Image: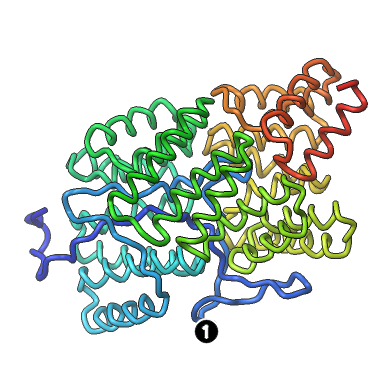
Amino acid sequence: MAASAAQPAPRRRPRAWLFLAAAVTIVVAGFGLDRLGVLRPSSANPSRPATVLPSAAAPAGVLPQASLGPVSGPDGPQLQVAGSTAALEKAIGVWTANLGRDPEDFISAQNLALDYYTLGRLTGDIDDYARAQAAVTQGLKAYPNDIGGRTMAALLQYTLHDFAGARTAAQAIYDADHRQLQALATAGDSELELGDYPAARTTFATLETTQPGAAISARLAHLASLEGHDAEAATLATRAGKEARTEGTTGTALAYYDYLRGFLAFQAGDLTVASASYEAALKDWPGSYLALEGLAKVRAAQGRTADAIKLYQQAIAIVPQPEYLAGLGDLYQLSGQATLAEQQYKTVRAIAQLQALQGKVYNRQLVLFDANHGENAAEAVSLAEGELAVRKDIYGWDVDAWALLAAGRAADADAAMQHALVLGTNDALLAYHAGMIAHGLGDDARAKTMLLRALALNPGFDPLQAVRARAVLATIGG
């Protein structure tokens, strides 16, 4: 795009690249855990303190949409994630030095932002995303018409959970230039996270028509799953994986497509396919915390508790998310290791105390932890409703409903739960929550139906909650 009259012409042409939104989302963490559950820095550069950020997804099951794949545009081919953090750190040093010599070098700023963004997905250091934002801002200050910088800025808004801002920014880029398909993809992903499913469906249809391939097939698979079309979702996920390989996708990017297939298979209760898919993802990317956590859930559902514990430990060593810690704690609790369970729960509580410093990005995971473990009911409701005010997707309604039930407000919980069920999503956790809410209202006939449905969909959907579902069914004659 040519510079406007108000802006000096760029002195160099930016490197052609497209911002990768594949393989993983921003669920990596820059903290390790010691045996006491105390957070300690463990980023690639220990001199840089790190914080943690969860997935854009609710732990109740919504996929991390930022990881659903790149959509190529006119400005360059799909970018593969570099496998070496050391190489990225070296490149970052080069771009940083360039900017030190010339603060208006928007090309170096653009490349620096891309490398920090990529590094953040590999190492989990949220500060890398902040540095990416700073670099984008610096580049756009020098050259506001830089489409690449504006597209990255919108993607970073999405990455950091400003879904409304990301949609507005990305849509404006696409409206001005219909060749900017990455911007359109970011807008569609944001629409999905905001719960605007008709708009997301329209956006994805445009992308499918304009540039079909693995990235859009994966998005369509996710949407089909949300809408309760499990067979179609599985077919689309399988197609996405085949298309990715045909397109030459490798490594961390390819691992995502296997993860997607595993995620959908687990939700549908097909543990065989889920296990094989997660194992395939780990072959492509041994450090895939998504696949490690997914495989941990599969092993737990298979009754292989010791294996599940080991897999959770591996995932947590990379990404100590509250959801992972709580899952590991629950397995310890169920296996009679109460002290170890409490250590995991203590770490979740410590993360909750850091919320003010981390932009409250863990809200949904923390709400579910509190509601599942009978803690901080009033605070859980406040967090859930604050999140729901700006992000009305079905899992936002589900989390709100579950928090309301924990707070003793079964009628309000039931009203919220109806919104969570509106798409007809086949998710055992949604059915379980609906059943427990019905039980709280004294509607045991409906409770029995929903709890049986949850266990039929996936008998091991959640080790602790499945035990509770069976206990309630035993009391109501299920």
Q: Residue furthest right?
A: 475
Amino acid found under the numbered disc labelled 1: Ser
Is residue 412 among what the camera can see? no
Give the quadrant of residue 141.
Answer: bottom left
User: Which x, y percent locates residue 266?
Assistant: 60, 41
Q: Identify whether 266 is placed above or below 401.
A: below
Q: Name the residue at 54% across, 23% down.
A: 423
User: Which x, y percent locates residue 283?
Assistant: 49, 61
- In the image, 60: left or right of 303? left
User: Which x, y percent locates residue 222?
Assistant: 47, 36
Out of 135 and 84, give the one closest to the viewer: 84
Q: How many marks?
A: 1
Residue density around tag 1, few if under 14, some if 14–19, many if 20 or more, within 10 Å: few
Q: Name the residue at 56% across, 39% down.
A: 265
User: Which x, y percent locates residue 397?
Assistant: 62, 32
Q: Name the residue at 88% across, 33% down.
A: 471
Is residue 242 among what the camera can see? yes
Give the quadrant of residue 284.
Answer: bottom left
- In the image, 292: left or right of 71? right
Give the quadrant of residue 29.
Answer: bottom right
Q: Which residue is mark 1?
A: 47
Out of 25 and 282, give the one closest to the viewer: 282
Q: Name the residue at 43% across, 64% down.
A: 129
- In the image, 229: left or right of 170? right
Question: Secondary structure beneath disc 1?
Answer: loop
